[in-house]
Image (tube, rainbow, N blue to C red):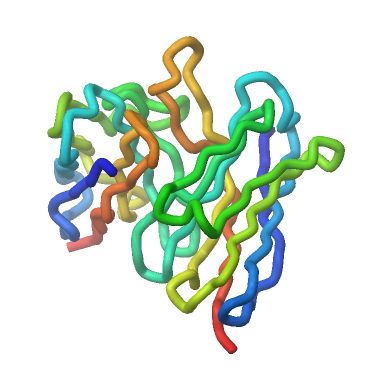
């Protein structure tokens, strides 16, 4: 199985900050990397596929980059609604594995 | 608008079989290129893909659970189901159903969207 490791596990930031979350795969997954956002008590919400392609309706302050084994999710200017837990997920090969999550909370 | 809704018992005894159903509205589960899956999340923990079934009935399982899992579909009811046998407390989790969307001719571009609201299943005597 491909292991996905996110860092940091938690992050405190303020509204307006630029934040970056990192996701590392245990082997190359090309650019087959997705991102999800999960708020407390809610199902995950799909944000990005193929490393950098935003799902329709996702604000442009979200961006993704990377290839191979190292990927990032960047939020350019945090908004109150962005405080949540973020998960990466590889779609390169089955079983489709997720990172352990990065909890983003208000400083 | 595509919507998914999980249903099933919220409490299962150890060693018994967990059975859940996901009812789909807004699209046909047998429509070409639709794939449907189950993902679970133990309380306070991360996400684990369990299984997927395709529009044609092909099934795919996480090897870590494969010996205990069965995914099936009922096209007449437009729903798909999960059975997990011999459950233990480690199977206590929120169980989500979701569509696995594939991008055209590039099947490795695939993602889970949308998701159901999730249903908490507790394994306890």
| Viewport quadrant of the N terminus of chain B | top right
Residue A47: x and y, percent? 39, 35
Side of B33 relative to B80 (left or right):
left
Q: Residue at x 68, y 26 (%)?
A: B56
Tell me, yes or no, if residue B114 can be seen here: no
Side of B7 relative to B86 (left or right):
right
To which quarter of the image does residue B82 belong? Answer: bottom right
Pick whichever, B64 or A3, lies toward us: B64
Tell me, yes or no, if residue B11 can be seen here: yes
Q: Residue at x 39, y 36 (%)?
A: A94
Residue A24: x and y, percent? 15, 41
Q: Is residue B50 above or below residue B122?
A: above
Q: Is residue B85 above or below residue A42?
A: below
Residue B45: x and y, percent? 35, 65
Pick whichever, B66 or B38, lies toward us: B66
Q: Residue at x 49, y 52 (%)?
A: B66
Side of B120 relative to B43 (left or right):
right
Pick whichever, B66 or B77, lies toward us: B66
Q: Is residue A41 above or below residue B75?
A: below
Q: Residue furthest top?
A: B105
Q: Is residue A26 above or below residue A85?
A: above
Pick whichever, A98 or A95, lies toward us: A95
Q: Residue furthest bottom?
A: B125
Residue B28: x and y, percent? 75, 30
Q: Residue at x 49, y 72 (%)?
A: B92
């Amino acid at each position: 199985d491909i292991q996905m490791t996110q860092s940091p596990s938690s992050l405190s930031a303020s509204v307006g900050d630029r934040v970056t979350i990192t996701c590392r795969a245990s082997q190359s997954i090309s650019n087959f990397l997705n991102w999800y956002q999960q708020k407390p008590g809610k199902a995950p919400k799909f944000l990005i596929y193929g490393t950098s392609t935003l799902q329709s309706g996702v604000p442009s302050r979200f961006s993704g980059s990377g290839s191979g084994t190292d990927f990032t999710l960047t939020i350019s200017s945090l908004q109150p609604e962005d405080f949540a837990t973020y998960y990466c997920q590889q779609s390169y090969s089955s079983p489709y594995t997720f990172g352990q999550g990065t909890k983003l909370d208000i400083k | 608008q595509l919507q998914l809704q999980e249903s099933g018992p919220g409490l299962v005894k150890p060693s018994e079989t967990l059975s859940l159903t996901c009812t789909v509205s807004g699209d046909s589960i047998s429509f070409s290129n639709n794939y449907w899956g189950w993902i679970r999340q133990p309380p306070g923990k991360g996400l684990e893909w369990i299984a997927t079934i395709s529009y044609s009935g092909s099934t795919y399982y996480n090897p870590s659970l494969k010996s205990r899992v069965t995914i099936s579909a009922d096209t007449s009811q437009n729903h798909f189901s999960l059975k997990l046998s011999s459950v233990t407390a480690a199977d206590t989790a929120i169980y989500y159903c979701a569509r696995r969307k594939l991008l055209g001719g590039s099947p490795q571009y695939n993602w889970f969207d949308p998701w159901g609201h999730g249903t908490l299943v507790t394994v306890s005597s």
